[in-house]
Image (cartoon, rainbow, N blue to C red):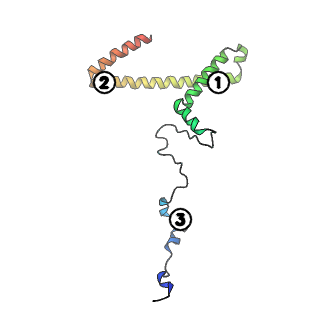
């Protein structure tokens, strides 16, 4: 039995060091990620708000609130209430620059909402045209329902 330990670890080319040289290791994709909070398909599911301990004192509570009432809905209600408060002020106070900027912002948001509603109605009109061409009986049933709803809205 030989006591030569060199036989089990023969000298040779150190290919692992060579691979780690100036280039990134191509096998790094097997390494464990350093950050376990990674977005899955970012942007595919609308706007993603990351609520964490870094930006909220109660992230679980805030996530529940946003799930029930979006930030947009919350801000919209605050804006509606503020508009009522501003309308109750004397005219000379209503002309303050901050209130004028607020009114401008509110008009812009209302315009965006109107454009979005018009786009939705255009899609409905296109869907109705398709339905009329492909399933006339279903189109007639829906047309009667829509006419009743439109008469009641007047």
Left or right placement of residue 146 versus residue 87 in this view: left
Q: Quadrant of the C terminus?
A: top left
Which residue appears farthest toward the bottom when viewing the image?
A: 1
Residue at 47 percent of width and 23 percent of height: 117
Which residue appears farthest toward the right when viewing the image?
A: 92
Residues at badges 3 and 2 in contact (C-beta under 8 Å)?
no
- In the displayed structure, 128 sits above or below 25; it is above
Front residue of 133/78: it is 78
Residue 3, label in figure = none
Callout 2: SS: helix
Front residue of 42/92: it is 42
Front residue of 118/144: it is 144
Residue 52 placed where, x, y %? 59, 42
- In the displayed structure, 40 sits above or below 30; it is above
- Residue at mark 3: 23
Callout 3: SS: loop
Residue at 30 percent of width and 20 percent of height: 139
Tag 3 or tag 1, which sits nearer the N-term?
A: 3
Tag 2 or tag 1, which sits nearer the N-term?
A: 1
- Residue at mark 2: 131
- Residue at mark 1: 102
Left or right placement of residue 119 versus residue 111 in this view: left
Tag 2 or tag 3, which sits nearer the N-term?
A: 3
Residue 58 placed where, x, y %? 61, 38
Q: Quadrant of the N terminus?
A: bottom left
- Please tell me in which quadrant of the rendered image residue 125 appears: top left
Front residue of 76/65: it is 65
Residue at 47 percent of width and 38 percent of height: 45
Real-space CA distance between mark 1 and mark 2, rounded to the nearest whole angstrom? 43 Å
Callout 1: SS: helix
Real-space CA distance between mark 1 and mark 3, rounded to the nearest whole angstrom? 54 Å
Residue 65 placed where, x, y %? 56, 32
């Amino acid at each position: 039995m030989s006591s030569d330990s060199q036989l089990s670890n023969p000298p040779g080319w150190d290919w692992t060091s060579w691979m780690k040289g100036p280039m990134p290791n191509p096998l790094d994709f097997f390494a464990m990620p350093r950050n376990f909070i990674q977005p899955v398909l970012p942007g595919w599911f609308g706007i993603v708000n990351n609520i964490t301990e870094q930006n909220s004192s109660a992230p679980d509570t805030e996530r529940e609130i946003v799930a029930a009432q979006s930030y947009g809905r919350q801000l919209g209600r605050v804006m509606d209430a503020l508009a009522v408060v501003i309308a109750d002020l004397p005219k000379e106070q209503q002309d303050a620059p901050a209130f004028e900027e607020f009114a401008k912002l509110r008009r812009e948001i209302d315009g965006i909402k109107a454009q979005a509603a018009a786009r939705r109605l255009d899609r409905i009109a296109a869907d109705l045209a398709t339905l009329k061409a492909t399933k006339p009986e279903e189109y007639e049933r829906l047309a009667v329902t829509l006419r009743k709803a439109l008469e009641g809205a007047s």
